[in-house]
Amino acid sequence: MFPQDASLNGHRIDELFWLACELTAPAFVIVVAVLAISVVRFRAREGRRASYTKGDSPRALGLTLGLVLVVFVGIDVNLAWHDAHAFHELFEKPPAPDQALRIRVLAEQFLWSFRYAGADGQFDTADDPTMTGEVHIPTGKPVIFELRSRDVIHSFCLPNMRVKQDALPGMTTYLYTEATVPGRYEIMCAQLCGFGHYAMRGTLVVETPEQFDQWMRERNHEFGVARAE
């Protein structure tokens, strides 16, 4: 049902989804059952007159209050508590920048561009490897994506990492994750951003640390040669 979970904490997001299904499914079944019974039992028949009520009788008020408490406490408060706990656990403690791989992401209609710090370890220098449409990350290491937009609001979505974040014009937002399973995964834009929104896709390439280090050496060499020329 879900795309493959290839991240360290993706299972927590899946657990929240299934919890929401488990809490709302019984309410859905009960509401549909009551509706079906009411349609059959109170349907128009010869000799039956329609009755009108304002719903302010003690019985009606008690039923309404009971339903509100069941739905609000049993579903809404329950979900909010679990969501807040998961948010605090997963997203309120970002990895230290010196312990993570930082990648700058520039969104524009209708593509993704990625920039790594070059061999000097600094951004915004001539040796920074840049790519369009494809980004490489290693397994077992936190990754911080620094998101910017050149034009409109985009949403950097990594379904297999179970995370997404908006890229906003005029500011930098951040998204972090840690991959666990090597492979090639889809990058999506989850925000309607114009006529070409459907084509704003990319590829997340997750590699072993050894493969990623080799790939980075090759990119640094390429950009170092290009700078020298």
Image (cartoon, grey):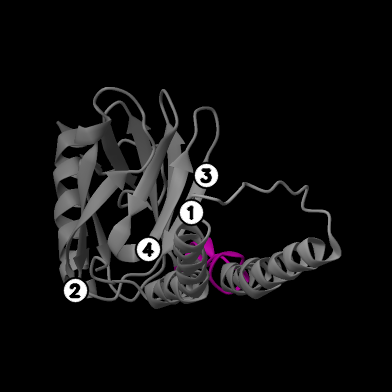
| Amino acid on which disc 3 is placed | Thr
Give the spatial CA distance, label 2 vs label 1: 71 Å
The nearer-to-camera label among 4 and 2 is: 4
Q: Badge 3: how crowded within 10 Å, few (<14), some, or many (20+)?
A: some
Find out whether residue 194 is within the magenta segment.
no
Please report contact status of discs 2 and 1: CB closer than 8 Å, yes or no: no
The nearer-to-camera label among 2 and 1 is: 1
What residue would you read off at disc 1? 43
Q: Quadrant of residue 57?
A: bottom right
User: Which of marks 1 and 2 precedes in the sequence?
Assistant: 1
Q: Position of residue 226 (x, y in %)?
A: 16, 35
What residue would you read off at disc 3? 173
The nearer-to-camera label among 2 and 3 is: 3
The nearer-to-camera label among 1 and 4 is: 1
- The residue segment tinted magenta is 88-99
Please report contact status of discs 4 and 2: CB closer than 8 Å, yes or no: no
Give the spatial CA distance, label 4 vs label 3: 17 Å
Residue shown at 44% from the left, 62% from the top: 36
Q: Which mark is residue 19?
A: none
Work out which quarter of the rendered image holds the N terminus and state it: bottom left
What residue would you read off at disc 2? 210
Give the spatial CA distance, label 4 vs label 2: 25 Å
